[in-house]
Amino acid sequence: KTEVFKLSAWRNHNRPADCLGPEGEVIPENIITKPPSAELRENQTDQDSLPPYDVLDDILRGLVENEESVDDISSRGHDRPLVERVEHLLYIAEYKRRQAAPGVKITRRNFGRDRRYPITNRFRDRT
């Protein structure tokens, strides 16, 4: 989410030369600054159940972009149970990524052809 927020803020201040879209603010500032939420209950935010985004981003970058193991990420100073929990959340959310429309690829790897986990038989990578 941190990268998407940065890209959104960048787009509000930059209009590519061949862009057909409008100049100026395209993504309202309150969308960028509003705390992310699954909005399952009133006043809920992602930070209620997730670590701070700088920590979460580093763990996800390790798991997704760099294909690091839980051991590798934990050895960098992250709490092992937290890394295992984030990995678990990544696995169990795979079905949501299959249901969603394809997104924009903003990093070296994406959730699509680059990275897929089985969604049946309670798959868990134990390497």
Image: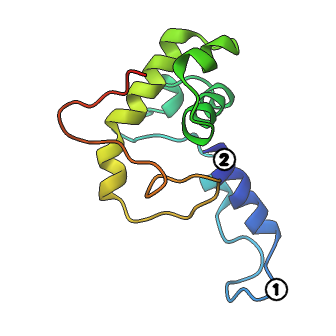
**Residue found 47% across the figure and 40% down from its top:** 37
Is the Cβ of the residue at disc 2 closer than 8 Å to that at disc 1?
Answer: no
Element at badge 2?
A: helix
As rendered, which of 36 and 69 lies closer to the eye? 69
As rendered, which of 53 and 60 lies closer to the eye? 60
**Residue found 49% across the figure and 54% down from its top:** 114
Does residue 41 show up?
no
Residue projecting furthest to the front: 127
Residue 41 appears in which quarter of the rendering?
Answer: top left
Disc number placed over residue 17 in the picture, else none: 1
Q: How many numbered tags mark residues here?
A: 2
Element at badge 1?
A: loop
What residue sits right under mark 2 in the picture? 33
The mark nearer the N terminus, 2 or 1, is 1
As rendered, which of 40 and 62 lies closer to the eye? 62
Question: What quarter of the picture does the C terminus occupy?
Answer: top left
| Horizontal arrangement in the rendering, residue 53 relative to residue 18 (left or right) | left
Mark 2 residue crowding within 10 angstroms, few (<14) / some (14–19) / many (20+): few
Q: Amino acid at mark 2?
A: Thr
| Horizontal arrangement in the rendering, residue 121 relative to residue 29 (left or right) | left
As rendered, which of 120 and 54 lies closer to the eye? 120
Image position, residue 111 (x, y; %): 47, 52
Mark 1 residue crowding within 10 angstroms, few (<14) / some (14–19) / many (20+): few
Q: Amino acid at mark 1?
A: Ala
| Horizontal arrangement in the rendering, residue 53 relative to residue 94 (left or right) | right
**Residue found 58% across the figure and 10% down from its top:** 79
